[in-house]
Amino acid sequence: MPPRMPIESGVPDPFQYMHPLMAKNYGAWKYHERPRPGVLCHTAKSGEKIWTVRAGTPRQLDLYTIRNLCDIADKYAESHVRFTIRSNIEFMVSDEASVQPLVDKLTSEGFPVGGTGPSVTMIAHTQGWLHCDIPASDASGVVKALMDELHEEFTHENMPNRVHMSTSCCQINCGGQADIAINIQHTKPPKINHDLVANVCERPLVVARCPVAAIRPALVNGKPSLEVDEKKCICCGACYPPCPPMQINDPENSKLAIWVGGKNSNARGKPTFHKLVAAGIPNNPPRWPEVAAILKKILNVYKGDAKDWERLSDWVERIGWPRFFELTELPFTKYHLDDWRGARDSLNASAHIRF
Amino acid sequence: MPPRMPIESGVPDPFQYMHPLMAKNYGAWKYHERPRPGVLCHTAKSGEKIWTVRAGTPRQLDLYTIRNLCDIADKYAESHVRFTIRSNIEFMVSDEASVQPLVDKLTSEGFPVGGTGPSVTMIAHTQGWLHCDIPASDASGVVKALMDELHEEFTHENMPNRVHMSTSCCQINCGGQADIAINIQHTKPPKINHDLVANVCERPLVVARCPVAAIRPALVNGKPSLEVDEKKCICCGACYPPCPPMQINDPENSKLAIWVGGKNSNARGKPTFHKLVAAGIPNNPPRWPEVAAILKKILNVYKGDAKDWERLSDWVERIGWPRFFELTELPFTKYHLDDWRGARDSLNASAHIRF
Amino acid sequence: MSKPMHDTPMLDQLESGPWPSFVTGLKRLANDEGKPYQDTMVDLLGQLELSYKTRKGYWKGGTLSVRGYGGGVIPRFSEVGDQYPESKEFHTLRIMPPAGMHYDTKILRELCDVWEKHGSGLIAFHGQSGDIMFQGAKSNKIQDAFDDLNDIGFDMGGAGPAVRTGMSCVGAARCEQSCVNEQKILRLLVNNFLDDMHRPALPYKFKFKVSGCPNDCMNSVQRSDMSVIGTWRDDMKVDQDEVKAYVAQKGRKYIVDNVITRCPTKALSLNDDDTLAVDNRNCVRCMHCINVMTKALSPGDDKGVTILMGGKRTLKIGDLFGTVIVPFMKLETEEDYEGLVEMAENVIDFFAENALEHERTGEMIDRIGLANFLEGIGLDVVPNMISEPRRSSYVNMVDWDEEAQKWNDRKAA
Amino acid sequence: MSKPMHDTPMLDQLESGPWPSFVTGLKRLANDEGKPYQDTMVDLLGQLELSYKTRKGYWKGGTLSVRGYGGGVIPRFSEVGDQYPESKEFHTLRIMPPAGMHYDTKILRELCDVWEKHGSGLIAFHGQSGDIMFQGAKSNKIQDAFDDLNDIGFDMGGAGPAVRTGMSCVGAARCEQSCVNEQKILRLLVNNFLDDMHRPALPYKFKFKVSGCPNDCMNSVQRSDMSVIGTWRDDMKVDQDEVKAYVAQKGRKYIVDNVITRCPTKALSLNDDDTLAVDNRNCVRCMHCINVMTKALSPGDDKGVTILMGGKRTLKIGDLFGTVIVPFMKLETEEDYEGLVEMAENVIDFFAENALEHERTGEMIDRIGLANFLEGIGLDVVPNMISEPRRSSYVNMVDWDEEAQKWNDRKAA
Ligand code: SRM
Ligand code: SRM
Ligand code: SRM
Ligand code: SRM
Ligand code: SF4
Ligand code: SF4
Ligand code: SF4
Ligand code: SF4
Ligand code: SF4
Ligand code: SF4
Ligand code: SF4
Ligand code: SF4
């Protein structure tokens, strides 16, 4: 028998798995309501309605959890689910009466119902120590620790607008832009294991990868290796993936940082990048309490001060950074002044002043 | 007798020349009104009022003109005048009844009364062929030609908000940011008169002056001279002032360009730089009709489409650049895409689209 | 009896608290008597606990793939395999989900069955690029696992310098804002480039993401090389009765302060009779007013997409948003869709030929300039591509007249 | 009879039209029988006509100054002096005007008399940096002209790598928006640096400009190295009766669309009773609402200045606006004013020592980074200096804790 070759079938057709009411009213929805946190009701132009119940998951799912979710879907819903981009699971039902029993069941099985509207929804996260080859922190663990703290905010809609968060386990930041993003900042240049470089790393490639041209090829103990200009090095870690002997992760000196005000939607202003607000936070497993404390402080201040429909970025734009630092009680340092390309545009070139 | 040494007296005290009512109410004004174009009435907290009549001048004043203005001030006003930053002259009177005769007199003597409120005020301008050592065009002449065309707009307040214009006779642009700025863009790299370089130019200094490092020292015909990498050269003319043998001005290929949307005030948005809208306009003395035509087109469209209090920059921000080019019928080209430092931020990084 | 559990005092602390615990899940697998993955998961927990203690990761990469394909598997070999031998191989298969991530319980159970048999029992729904991540296969199980997944209709996603797995929002399936057929666009694009996905040979990764409207629920502007966003060209729809009802409910001041003043282009005005005046020529389709007054306002009828290029994360010139290269493209007829695919082909060809090694599209465009990129893929410059024209006078505009002529010719045409 | 007039067909065309003509003025001087400058002006018109014909300039620079000073004269020698010998020297004296450019007719006539005697009769009110430009002296007349001007109370302005002539707006003399004593600030600053003005020895030019409020009628943000702008710190003043009167006159919709929606920070709200709610904590003192409703609104009482550094035109890194280095400085007591001068001294010392040749302050700050500049002049970083914090993660924050401590210490103090 010739070896089996792949069926290059690509992205599967979703209609085969989609809730029939969604397939039927595809492209013909009229409006939606949120009868309660975690529940959406979409009304089609045809007048038909579908209820969605959204619940949190840990994303990293074991077979038991998935099969349990399937059991719930079969018994309390209509056997159709979808996952959101934030790893929440959604159960669709065509009958309002099914909503409450489904919510109750999910809750009792430990799946928090929420994440809709102006709530803090699930944190977009990455692989961390569980699977990635370059992480300086964990992913699922950080998220579990933080979502425990934010459970109330997930299951209630008490925020001014939706809050999208992300965490990332290295500076590459697979988690992406967010209202609040948490990443790692290394503060020591890579320590080079010179014995390994020659075997594992293509040297020109690593040299080319450094964003500030801090790496040059060098002979160390007679062997081809690399050298880092520590004055230039910005500790970004970009050299580590292509050349693991350039150890950048450091249990002590790789610190967590918090960035706020990222927004990818076009609502109101154009999309904006998130900005640094706090750094130097210890990478403290298993519950990262220092991160959680700052995060909650920021969220509380936002919750108390922002107006309806203001995303975190809109709110800070209105109240200004001086007030942000005042209200959150976070220190403002010279590191908050950008110094990367185009940094000049981040300075205050105006007499717009906040008192 | 020892030679006379300067009295280093610095900036003269203005109070000795100031209208007494202004000196008296110094720092204690309450509000102002504009009874008619070209006339301001300021009311002090004391209740006293002062009327200001503003008139246009050519800035380059001969003794006759100045003495004539003095005669008018003595006879029709109260012998106190001031000049604005835009070379308009202001006559102050303490009596409303003096206003009309003063206005009439100025008008009959050929000094247009206006430039206040939402009008097109005098164009800020520079030296040009009359005095500067590096101009590619004239200054006073361009301004005279354009103000002739804009006389109506100076003497009336029919614009949405005040219009500040500037012209400049080389790319250095001593005229500065403006709602509408007119400058020169060279389109040929400098032609070097190699015989002169060694005598007139400090070569390292010139090399350092080039913003794109296109100049290198070279030996030409055995003499120390300079060489320009024409591929790199952006024809900015920065090398010409320190090294006049690097002839950049070209009667044919130095063309006029128009920039719009500069604003230095902090009103509403922060200050903004002006942006290129038209280029390749012939440098056509004595009346530069091609510039005048485009200018008037832009002003007319702005006048017709902008809302009250919108500066040109505010207006374009609201209606968008696609509409600006549509309404002004100016061509949009690849040159409108910025490619200088930080240019990336000028691209549309959003789904905000204008139809 | 299987391998005994390692002590995991730190991980254990992640079992308490109201959020469902992945540790509990991992332990369940490690305690799953008799299952092929049981020992693997015991050692995996051991290694993870070690990471928590030492604050260090212990995986390294390698090279692995399935027959016929060059990418899609993320190989992981442990650096502490001597201490945790059963999990010393813990590879991931990136498998593309149905567009929009719709499942029924039947297919979910089938996916579980495959991973019970050949894998670790640990599946992520989903990775940040949208893949179902089947994590924890040993090297010798990869092929079997893939074959079984492939048999039930699933295909490998992207990894390495390749077209990557894409994402599209729920959109038309359940969203009144949807302006386009998101799943169709996504499938058309990705499925057209399966060769570039499965046999990585591009300069670097290339991602497609599709959002049905400018709310951009797929983060496409920042997280994809080619972002396709639904929009409309005619006037938005206004149901003035619903507007009045909303004003009545919330009060005029609330509407002014939360809707009217938030419009980025001041295109809204509240009339004295509590109806809404929309200056559609100046609406930039930001979605805000429509989001707030979802019953009263909705997108127009003349729908299509805006296309942006170059979004990505930080390496190596800094974070980039995509920027507009096609302000509006109608997607109605099959020819329209073919036009979209053709454009993507031009883009990927140009990228393949002109990007440097490990250079994303956004970096390439930044390096060569948008004008050159557009010329390379055969698109004309238009003002919707910029947020403002050049403010630097440092430029040689020698060809101004010819360039201006091009515009005038196009306008006349 | 003096030198006959050259034909000036092109310039003649600039005598028609409603705007007063500088050509007519020049001709008047050229026709001024018996005056020492008559022939000069005849040839000047000849050379200018030549420029109009050939589209080329014919002046070149040189070195000239008055006794005791190194700068302030702009020497101009003609390259076509053989054709136009009488105007082959045509130098300019830059003379500083009274702050705010106030004159009475007596002093204006005196200025004229000097220039009638020693110069060309041509004076510009004013140059873009604010100087009275006495244009067209021959080399041997410069000293006499200056001496006479100096005797009646005027001093030389700046040129070359020096502190330059500064400008302040009319401000307190006739403007209700004025928050400070503009002329005092300007005179204090410039007059403190007369040595740096008159004996050019800085790396490059350095300009002061003073505006009494954020309308910045002196363009200081873009046209000066050190921009001093009046502002206030407490609440703006609102006369609600005048507000109501304005609403009554213009209508609510007009107010909402032209005032409320234009506030950059959404700090305004129109109450249902037609009074205005101002959220003063979020007002950024942009001036818009105050400009529109000048009778109803005005700056608060706790006044002072904001200081920005680094504005300039294009050479060589591109146009720069100044950026905030002092968000607020009170200027009430003489010590306050001394503090301002001291700060300017620190800035100019630092500039003198650290800027490269021909480098403006803005370029220097861009090159070394704002943080280093602030450290150099002894100022602390505060959030009002930025429009947003760092968005690039490319930074080594090893000293975070110490830097954070500085902030906390300052807050506690
Ligand atoms: C289900 C999901 C799409 C999917 O295919 O998976 C989705 C679904 C909806 N989004 Fe979203 N968004 C989803 C992720 C996003 C993201 C991406 C993300 O979360 O990383 C964004 C943009 C990212 C950003 O940070 O800017 C996003 C930006 C929006 C916005 C714009 C909000 C704003 O004001 O900036 C709206 C409009 C709104 O809130 O009314 C919106 C609105 C909606 C609506 C109301 C659309 C509709 O009419 O059905 C849907 C949600 C109901 C609700 O209340 O949650 N959705 N939405 C995603 C749910 C994620 C989750 O589990 O929490
Ligand atoms: C698995 C995943 C995180 C997760 O847990 O969800 C992930 C994991 C890795 N990413 Fe990622 N990225 C993942 C989505 C992203 C995203 C988000 C997205 O696609 O929307 C981004 C930001 C968007 C973008 O494309 O820039 C992202 C930006 C990166 C980058 C930076 C690329 C850049 O140009 O700046 C790298 C580094 C690289 O490619 O050299 C990277 C590299 C990696 C590597 C391969 C690390 C490496 O270089 O060795 C990680 C492998 C981890 C592992 O063991 O599985 N990953 N990565 C995501 C892919 C799963 C999936 O297929 O669904
Ligand atoms: C006289 C002068 C100051 C001086 O010391 O010479 C002056 C005087 C006044 N300005 Fe100005 N501005 C003067 C140049 C400027 C400039 C600089 C320039 O023209 O190059 C600017 C900022 C530059 C810019 O382009 O942004 C300027 C930006 C403003 C603004 C802000 C306008 C805006 O909306 O952006 C106001 C507010 C307003 O219009 O109510 C203003 C308002 C005023 C008021 C109404 C202030 C007052 O209450 O007295 C004064 C003028 C009455 C009027 O209607 O013209 N003035 N004003 C200058 C007259 C120039 C002229 O002859 O036309
Ligand atoms: C006379 C004047 C134009 C006018 O007609 O009003 C002028 C004329 C010259 N400027 Fe200027 N600048 C004049 C105000 C300005 C301004 C406006 C301002 O001060 O508000 C600017 C923009 C602001 C700034 O400082 O950047 C200005 C930016 C320049 C520059 C560019 C500086 C830069 O860093 O980008 C140069 C070139 C240089 O310095 O190398 C320059 C150079 C020159 C030179 C000296 C040309 C040269 O390098 O040989 C010109 C002498 C002309 C002459 O023959 O009199 N001039 N120049 C203005 C000074 C008159 C006065 O003292 O009142
Ligand atoms: S953020 Fe870094 S460590 Fe985390 S999954 Fe992505 S590449 Fe790996
Ligand atoms: S950490 Fe970053 S800056 Fe430092 S050497 Fe490596 S790639 Fe270069
Ligand atoms: S703009 Fe250029 S040519 Fe004109 S005065 Fe200034 S430096 Fe001279
Ligand atoms: S014109 Fe400008 S770019 Fe060209 S050589 Fe001279 S300084 Fe350099
Ligand atoms: S992007 Fe638009 S169409 Fe798609 S789910 Fe979000 S709101 Fe709906
Ligand atoms: S969609 Fe956005 S831009 Fe358009 S009218 Fe509504 S708020 Fe304004
Ligand atoms: S800057 Fe302010 S204080 Fe000075 S004149 Fe202009 S409006 Fe008046
Ligand atoms: S001054 Fe400007 S920022 Fe302050 S309330 Fe008025 S419009 Fe708003």
Image (cartoon, coloured by chain):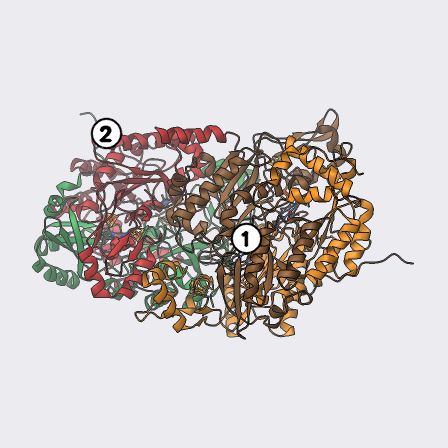
Chain colours: A brown, B green, C orange, D red
Ligand 2 has an atom within 8 Å of the beta carbon of the residue at disc 1: no
Quadrant for residue D193, please give it: top left
Say which quarter of the image contains residue D348.
top left
Q: Nearer the viewer, residue B146 or D336?
A: D336
**Residue with the mark numbered 2:** D335
- The x and y percentages for residue A18 are 65, 65
Q: Mark 2: which amino acid?
A: Glu
What's the residue at 25%, 62% (across, down)?
B154
Label 1 is found on which chain of the structure? Answer: C
Residue C164, x across and y down, in percent: 68, 54
Instruction: Identify whether C169 is placed above or below A130.
Output: below
Secondary structure state at the residue bearing disc 2: helix
Q: Nearer the viewer, residue A257 or A234?
A: A257
The residue located at (30%, 62%) in the rendering is: D256
Q: Is residue D171 visible?
A: yes
Residue D148, position as x, y percentages in the image: 18, 37
Note whether A226 is above or below C117 in the view shown.
Answer: above
Question: How many tags in the picture?
Answer: 2
Binning the other alpha carbons within 10 Å of mark 2 as few (below 14), some (14 to 19) or many (20 upward) gives: few
Q: Which residue is mark 1?
A: C321
Give the image quadrant in which the ligand numbered 9 is located.
Answer: bottom right
